[in-house]
Image (cartoon, rainbow, N blue to C red):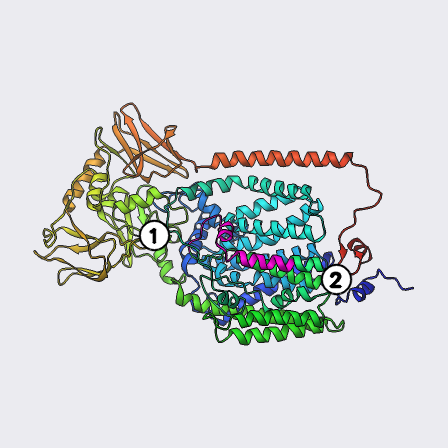
Amino acid sequence: MPDQTTPAAISRTTGLATGLATGRGTGLAASLAALLTALAVCVGDAVARTFPFGPERRGVNDLANQFVPYHAHLWDLLHGRADGGLLLNWQSGWGSSFLPDLGTYLGSPFALLVALFPRDDIEYAVYAVTLLKMAAAAAAMTLALLRMRTGVWWAAGVLGASYALCGWSVIEATYNPMWLDGLIAFPLLCLVGEWVRQGRRPLLGPLVVALCWVGNFYTAYMATIGAALVLLVRLAVVHELRIRVVLRAVATVLLGIGLAAPILVPVFLGSTRAYPGWTNQFQPAGWTDFFARLLPATYSFTTPAAFVGTGTLLLAGGLLFHRKVPRRERLLWAGFAVAVAVSMQWGPTHLVWHVFATPNGSPYRQTFVLSGVMVIAAWTVLSHGWPGRRALLGGVGVVAVAGAGAVTSDLITGWSYPLFALGVAGACGGLWLARREKLPVVAAALLAGVLVGQAAATTAYADRERLGRLDDYPAWGAEQDRRTAALGKADGWPAYRTDSGREQITGNEPMLFGGQGAAYYSSHTPSVLTTTLASLGGGWTSRGRNLQSLDNPVTDALFGVGARWRGDRVVRTDADALLPLVTVRPEGAPAPRYGASPFRNQEQLLGASVYALPAKGAACPVGSEVFLWAPDFRGKAKLGADGRTVKMTGEMPKRRAALSSLGVQKTAGALVSLKGQRGKKYEVGCLDRARLTAAVAGLKASAPESVEVTDSGIRARLRPGTKGTVVIAAPRIAGWTCEGRPAETYGGLLAVRADGSRTTVSCDFRTPGLRAGLGAGAVAFVLLWGWLLWLGRRGHRRPSPTSPTSPEPLAGTGIRQDTLARTS
């Protein structure tokens, strides 16, 4: 009788093509998945002629406004060139907390790779990091699939790539690289679920959870929900839904989150103190649009990009019709996939997925979990043997229904159905060939080719659509090199600040080009910074989260801006109109109480009257500099007939136009004229430069003798007998202490009292929540260590079993995987 446990016999018994995954096969599968993913993305970008493969811009929205500048700042930190450290960023927002931004935008270990690139190639670095994250997600999903069930290694690799190339990834997450950490987290957490189910790797499990949550807590939260549900389905499939396993899973997740607390707690507190931005009400997508997003080459910002490749969709659709899959397993996985899809469309579960708040922008950020579930369902089919005619026809029927359901959607493009039809034909052909043992290479090439072709086409289409629908920004070039070099040459920090300019290209120019300005864009933009800057005449976009530089002589004096980019060059501030970073207001001087006029608010903070405010229809005195305050005005403003035209971009509350100079009043009676469609309420201020110079001289006379700035604080040596309020030109954000006590505030700025006995003033910054996070992390570490010791002692006390615990049988054969391992 022939041996029924040889690899060839197992292959014949299961009906699988050659190449059952072993240790080596798992590595090959993961490598194949990563390679296919990188190939599809690069081909798609090359077809669209998008950076770095062509002249079309890649930098849109948050990619250019946040991720490229933040990675540039990380590069500076890693190379010792940044102003500030891990806790405090002196470059943005006149001094902002950095640890919450680090945890939000730069928590991924992949971010560290930017240090290997030249500084002026930072956009190439971010592209490489993005590509590597997607490849890592493909490899992680492949490993998770093969841990769940044994199967053909190259088929697992193709499915792993289909997950990483899902529409959510190549259309939305590609310009929000932090979301890609969630794409990696879902399969990794599913892998942790397998370890929990099997009672293995009690140390590595919490560490992986911690890594996922540090990478990006927001998408890790969604990935954790998805992985927990996958574990429950896995337990229900094999009738192992035991409370002990569930408790072990909960403990693993909580310990992992606890280990990540030193980052998570500061991030959470940073969010609570941020300017509120805007809120949205969830509106579910129409089901025709929902089905349309399963097809290739579609684009929409408000519908779920659930495309996973037609081959994967066909396999998942054929699950219910594959008789080799036990009925219970078919029903559980199919029902689970449908439930996840429906949960995305129902308001209460939508809120659960999104931490109980509808997100700004894309409302379907959990779509990658649905894509992952469909991939797992497809793998369930393959792990029980290549689908036969019944399963294939059933899958084609499901896919056809989805395609027909999308016919009336406006999201369908001219490429969608042709690519869809080719995908169905190619997938059916590849699966039919895979059943023939002599043609596995052809089958693999056909299935992989269909996936890469559809994903590349979807990537290319999305690249082009984004440029027409989203704000785009120029790639780094010679002009950016010139600007960075000029700002670096002018930099005099901490003697004075260098501002990167009012004419901003992105929302975080100080981090990108250098200097120490007011501009700052983050999910953690402090409320105190936004309100203070707005009171002084600052502008914003993104409803107060994206703050702009303020080009004004009074605020330049108050915040020690000694040089700034204006027009096409660096302009320096006259020394007699420049204050040091630390000044002293006389004892008894009233603290500013801001009102509606930014001109009066600036005067209060300065402590002197420097503006004349003419009545409507009246002109400024000749020789004064004319400033216009029209925060809601969108249009063009001009002083007199010969004055220069200034463009204003107000549209409250989304956009707030900054206080702007219209030039010097050269002709008596010249008036301000506005030409626009909205927001024509305005106020004019006439700045007297002589008065400003006198006010600055008065404050200089009592200023500290010296100022020292560190990565996390500031120190000043006071003049003997100094009394009054020491004011530091930095926003009084949470976390500042001066002389061991919480810092005071003076018009929104950092302040401390001086009673005449002090010779120095010292203020230090510690990120709010850091101490609590470190404490929680320490507790989690101790609990984890105790748990490991308990498990070790329990293992020593337990008698050795007479036979090893039987692993899950190779699906459809009754042959155990340990038997396969021994015979391979």
- The circle drawn on residue 543 is 1
Task: Pick whichever of labels 1 and 2 is earlier in the sequence.
Answer: 2
Picture residue at 39% right of the left edge, 34% below the top? 764
* Residue 355 is covered by the magenta coloring: yes
- Expressed as whole percent of the image width and height from the top left, the position of residue 388 reads 72, 70
* Residue 740 is covered by the magenta coloring: no
Position of 735 compared to 248: left or right?
left
- Kind of residue sitting beneath label 2: Leu
Q: Single out the residue that lies furthest toward the right.
A: 1
The residue nearer to you, when weighing 235 against 582, is: 235
Position of 305 compared to 721: left or right?
right
Q: Is residue 303 above or below residue 744?
A: below
**Pointer 2: what residue?**
20
Q: Secondary structure at mark 2?
A: loop
Q: Dot 1 surroundings within 10 Å: few (below 14), some, or many (20 or more)?
A: some
Q: Secondary structure at mark 1?
A: helix
- Expressed as whole percent of the image width and height from the top left, the position of residue 469 reads 40, 65
| Highlighted magenta segment, given as a residue range | 333-360
